Amino acid sequence: MTYSARINELNETITANGAPWGAIDAESAARMVVQNRFRTGLDIARYTAKIMRADMEAYDRDPANYTQSLGTWHGFIAQQKMISIKKHFGSTKRRYLYLSGWMVAALRSEFGPLPDQSMHEKTSVPALIGELYTFLKQADARELGGLFRQLDDAKAAGDAVNTHRLLKEIDEHETHVVPIIADIDAGFGNAEATYLLAKKMIEAGACALQIENQVSDEKQCGHQDGKVTVPHEDFLQKIRAIRYAFLELGVPEGIIVARTDSLGAGLTKQIAYSTEPGDLGDQYNAFLDCDEVDPASITNGQVFISRDGKLLAPKRLPSNLYQFRTGTGEDRCVLDCITALQNGADLLWIETEKPHVEQIAGMVDRVREVIPNAKLVYNNSPSFNWTLNFRQQVYDAWAEAGKDVSAYERDKLMSVDYDATDLAAEADEKIRTFQADAAKRAGIFHHLITLPTYHTAALSTDNLAREYFGEQAMLGYVKNVQREEIRQGIACVKHQNMAGSDIGDDHKEYFAGEAALKAGGKDNTMNQFAAA
């Protein structure tokens, strides 16, 4: 419905209610309706799920249509990200949000900073989803409020051309609300616990949930040691639980991202249930590191499985965990991926130890032999040393091609001494094109950085502290922060406006008319940034 049609509709409602509603202005009410197009988190989940499904279809047609996101840990960070994207690129198309369980644990837990081991409160994740969308909706209201002010000025000046332009811009306004891929870790318990938490996350607005195949109570960060996986059937129960949650809440297009940690996980807590050779449980157990047992030398407490008529003892650690055979990680990843897609997952996530296109592509090629349209979400992780990894990749490629690499020490390629070299330049170009290259070659539909804003907050705060508490004092803030905000057109230089003061003034005028006591008068110091 257009803005003008909305005014007419509300005017009819107000008129129908007669004198008691006589002080209500239809256009003011229409503005409030337009500024709040999403009433609930489920409205958001349904809207964004359709966007994400359309983007997945576009990627299948052309892998140049890959999508991206940055991890966010506060509503303000998400808001500023989307405002910046609209400012620089004119559209939020194919740009999402990512909610990292790592950042929830490290930054949002009531226990204080925690490692990424699912020890934070379950409710903190859906609460953060709700917060992210609250800030994005406020960004819509703020931007539309500016357009309404311009519209009032154009009407007052009798400027028909600008009035028409602004009405069209209001009708075609692109929301800051975009899809979110939200981390549900390993489900925080059994399948029922996963289902209950999934519902809360979807109700808060999440259209895509990412779940991993680690043991819930043994969960580790994907880039640390000590990861323990579960048999496939245990994981599939949780995938089904999430799908039921989406269906129950009326979001059938909801997306499930199945993450496998098998590449770096060498342990399992359970021997899988198997009824016949070659079934899924048997395939999982086939990866176990076992010793053949002589029945005459059985010792106390041993656990056995039978395979091909032989009695085998899986190697069990003092932790009561079983270990997989060395070198089986890629095979286990491939089986995990195929099984997840065959049982209701929509996208895959393979947690790797380095960003290497051909390594990822090798596994995806094998998955696509069974499921041709398999697609990945990939973590462009800050846990990777991107500079060193790609310089070593170039070094190895040069060496294999017979190119002279005697001027370089492979283990010291991170050194600033190499920054101006041809090798470093080629490595940087490979980093620059990594996302496009991996989207084309390795089936990566969505590229994300899990916790970039954690690092940018630390870096910018360190720089400000060094300057402000040092010799530069106030100039350290003015020169490096405020002056740059003004010159780069950063919206929150007018921080009162960003926090909603103008929206509040609009409401005061709607509610109180001429009696409204507004904050945005001539003595508001924010007016010093009018030209910014």
Image (tube, grey):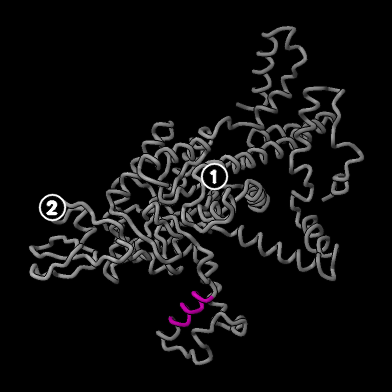
Question: In the orientation shown, which residue stands out farthest toward the right?
Answer: 523
SS for callout 1: helix
Q: Is residue 90 visible?
A: no
Q: Is residue 42 magenta?
A: no
- Number of other residues with Cα within 10 Å of mark 2, as a class: few under 14, some 14 to 19, many 20 or more: few
Q: Does the magenta stretch include residue 392?
A: yes
Q: Can residue 426 be seen in this view?
A: yes
Q: Residue at x 38, y 69 (%)?
A: 359
Decide whether the magenta segment is chiefly helix, strand or loop.
Answer: helix
* Of the image marks 2 and 1, the number of the one nearer the N terminus: 1
Residue 443 drawn at (x, y percent): 40, 58
Residue 274 drawn at (x, y percent): 18, 52
The residue singled out by tag 1 in the image is 124
Residue 36 in the image: above or below residue 317: above
Q: Residue at x 85, y 32 (%)?
A: 518
The residue singled out by tag 2 in the image is 276
Question: In the orientation shown, which residue stands out farthest toward the front?
Answer: 300
Q: Magenta part of the protein: which range?
A: 388-396
Residue 15 in the image: above or below residue 38: above
Q: Residue at x 64, y 31 (%)?
A: 36
The quadrant where residue 141 appears: top right
Quadrant where the N terminus sits is: top right
Q: Could you tell me the amino acid type at mark 2?
A: Glu
> Left or right: where does residue 429 sit relative to residue 270?
right
Q: From the viewer's side, name the closer residue of 33 and 122.
A: 122
Q: Could you tell me the amino acid type at mark 1?
A: Ser
